[in-house]
Amino acid sequence: MTKKIVGCFLLLFLVFSFGSAAVAEEAEKPTCDFTLTFYSQYIWRGFELSKDSLVIFPSITVSYKGFGFNVWGDFDTDYEGANTGGNGTEWWETDWVLTYSNTLNVGFTDLNWTVGWIYYDVDGGEDEELFVILGLDTFLSPELSVWNGIEYGDDSWYFNFALSHSWDLPVCWPKAENKWSLDVGGWVSYYYIENGDLNGSDYEEWHDGTIWAGVNVPINDWCTITPSINYTFPLCDDSEDFLEAASFDGNDSDFFYGGVTLSVSF
């Protein structure tokens, strides 16, 4: 609860500071991005965190001069966990994220990099991670992210390598300058969790993979709707056993899911 209060004060401070800075320096203004996602399932790092219900993910990000503050939530419309007695609506998770991003020219292209901290406030527990994201502004947009858990006593490292590509589509709304686009991508991950496997020893495996596709539909210059589909699967036998054991039924390790996202930027 204390971290939630601190997060709220941080958000108010950033908004007030950004507003004051914008008055003094009109050439560079803060930005605010809001997204509202409706998905058929909540899958995180291959783990099944919802089942047979609509999940809603609201998110708001305030950014200025490379610094960003984000609040992300998960609302499950028919949660099957113990807190609701088996079924019922549940605000299950709130994440608070601080980041700094910048770009470095490496000769043949630009290297986009982000460092950050995330606090997970989840029913049944909480966690914190430090992370680094490195991405090249080149063909297939290769991106490597590294996440280190720092809240619990047991150490954890999550390595994710992703590729993606976007194609413009010859369609646009009358009031939108930008064309529609087809985005596709995927990733693989390697996961280390101290004392984390099913037998109580270290878990250290190629963990989960995901392939995805989405169509960006600009409604106007500041609003976009994106329907998307995803398929997530384990990368080895040990990760399959791990993901199955963590699933609601105890026998699911690969998941096909999708939904739609409304994005508003100003």
Image (tube, rainbow, N blue to C red):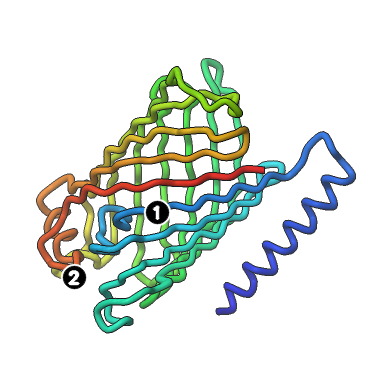
Which mark is on residue 135? none
Q: Label 2 is placed on what type of residue?
A: Gly
Q: In which quarter of the image is residue 10?
A: bottom right
Q: Is mark 2 on a helix, strand or loop?
A: loop
**Residue appearing at x 48%, y 42% in the figure:** 133
Q: In this view, does 193 lie to the left or right of 17?
A: left
Residue 107 on image: x %, y %: 56, 17
> Quick one: which residue is furthest to the front in this view?
174
Which mark is on residue 38? 1
Q: Label 1 is placed on what type of residue?
A: Phe
- Density class for disc 2 (Cα within 10 Å; few <14, some 14-19, many ≥20) is few
**Residue appearing at x 43%, y 68% in the figure:** 93
**Is residue 238 depicted above or below 107 in this figure?**
below
> Which circle's residue, 2 or 1, is located before the other in the chain?
1
Residue 168 on image: x %, y %: 45, 20
Residue 13 on image: x %, y %: 75, 62
Q: Mark 2 sits on what residue?
A: 200
Q: Which of 21 and 33 is in front in this view?
A: 33
Residue 218 on image: x %, y %: 52, 33
